[in-house]
């Protein structure tokens, strides 16, 4: 037994939740810093009490975070220095192959794979592996952005095109349910409208009206009802109110409050559906913050707590 993320006792070999940090943010289009997210969340996690009022003690199932992959760090440095689309596309393809093979191995052992970004380009391999393993899944995608662009800035695997790549490359994803979207373009609107219901987007004004009319619970219940039995949970931290994540790469006013985020997951966990894979992306730290202070950053603190809630509610769906 070792003490790892959350300073929790864990057997790395048998831990139910296996976290792969992917510190890559070369496709960001506004502000960088999400490559530091995994290390910052790890540092901040020691301040999270292990007994949680919503999810109990998920650490008892085992939560193991792999070491920061040096190859990913090298790819990020190379891609960031180059910014040449041909170079970046080659490197993001290598990331996808790496996360895909890692996730396949985790799933084969009956464990739950968790990707910790990094920008939102990084979980594609995990989503593909989970979809193939379970044959038919839905995705609950919490984000300020639709991420349905066909590439962005000539990057094929951009943070702005992750869900486009999912719906065009992963046929086992039967339904994509998006929550909190408040920044999108005509191209993305056309894809949503032309998807025959495969992509359903609950925009931020829908959330606002439900909140203001006192009908938030039925609104969330309706969202969850559109998901199939097996659910992959993809959370871009900028889907939350940006007061919770001020350093994230592309913050947008609006979004879910922390209590609303937790309530949505609570309804999912009580629905009888199963969460089969996870990712948390776009947690960043301020560019002028010294590395030895990353764990004290507000964004990292919130990110560590969001991740613990995600894992805890996923665990609830297994019993």
Image (cartoon, rainbow, N blue to C red):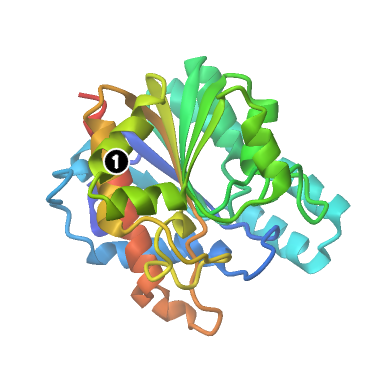
Nearest the camera: 305 or 176?
176
Q: Locate residue 126, reporting x and y percent.
A: 54, 35
**Which residue is farthest top?**
135
Nearest the camera: 4 or 29?
29
At horizontal 51% and vertical 78% (from top left) the residue drawn is: 286
At horizontal 47% and vertical 26% (from top left) the residue drawn is: 138
Nearest the camera: 227 or 298?
227
Q: Which quarter of the figure has residue 30? A: bottom right
Q: Is residue 5 visible?
A: no
Residue 316, placed above or below residue 137: below
Residue holding disc 1: 265
Residue 120, placed above or below residue 272: below
Instruction: Count neighbours of disc 1 (C-alpha within 10 A) and say few if under 14, some if 14 to 19, many if 20 or more.
Output: many
At horizontal 79% and vertical 53% (from top left) the residue drawn is: 88
Q: Locate residue 181, reporting x and y percent.
A: 51, 50
Q: Locate residue 279, reporting x and y percent.
A: 46, 44
């Amino acid at each position: 037994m070792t003490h790892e993320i959350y300073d929790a006792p864990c057997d790395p070999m048998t831990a139910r939740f296996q976290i792969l940090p992917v510190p890559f943010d070369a496709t960001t289009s506004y502000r960088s810093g999400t490559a530091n997210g995994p290390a910052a969340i790890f540092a901040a996690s020691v301040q999270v009490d292990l007994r949680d009022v919503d999810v109990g003690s998920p650490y008892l199932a085992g939560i193991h975070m792999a070491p920061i992959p040096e190859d990913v760090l090298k790819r990020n440095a190379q891609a960031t220095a180059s910014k040449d689309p041909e170079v970046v596309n080659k490197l993001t393809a290598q990331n996808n192959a790496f996360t895909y093979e890692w996730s396949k191995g985790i799933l084969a052992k009956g464990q739950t794979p968790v990707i910790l970004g990094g920008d939102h380009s990084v979980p594609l391999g995990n989503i593909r592996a989970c979809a193939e393993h379970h044959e038919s899944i839905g995705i609950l995608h919490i984000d300020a952005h639709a991420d349905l662009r066909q590439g962005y800035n000539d990057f094929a695997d951009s943070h702005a095109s992750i869900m486009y790549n999912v719906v065009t490359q992963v046929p086992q994803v039967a339904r994509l349910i998006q929550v909190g979207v408040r920044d999108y373009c005509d191209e993305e609107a056309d894809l949503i409208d032309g998807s025959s219901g495969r992509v359903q987007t609950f925009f931020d004004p829908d959330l606002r009206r439900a909140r203001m009319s006192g009908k938030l619970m039925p609104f969330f219940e309706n969202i969850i009802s559109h998901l199939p039995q097996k659910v992959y949970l993809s959370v871009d931290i900028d889907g939350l109110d940006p007061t919770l994540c001020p350093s994230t790469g592309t913050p947008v006013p609006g979004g879910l409050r922390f209590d609303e985020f937790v309530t949505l997951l609570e309804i999912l966990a009580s629905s009888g559906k199963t969460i089969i894979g996870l990712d948390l992306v776009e947690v960043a730290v301020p560019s002028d913050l010294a590395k030895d202070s990353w764990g004290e950053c507000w964004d990292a603190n919130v990110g560590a707590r969001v991740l613990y809630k995600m894992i805890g509610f996923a665990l609830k769906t297994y019993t």
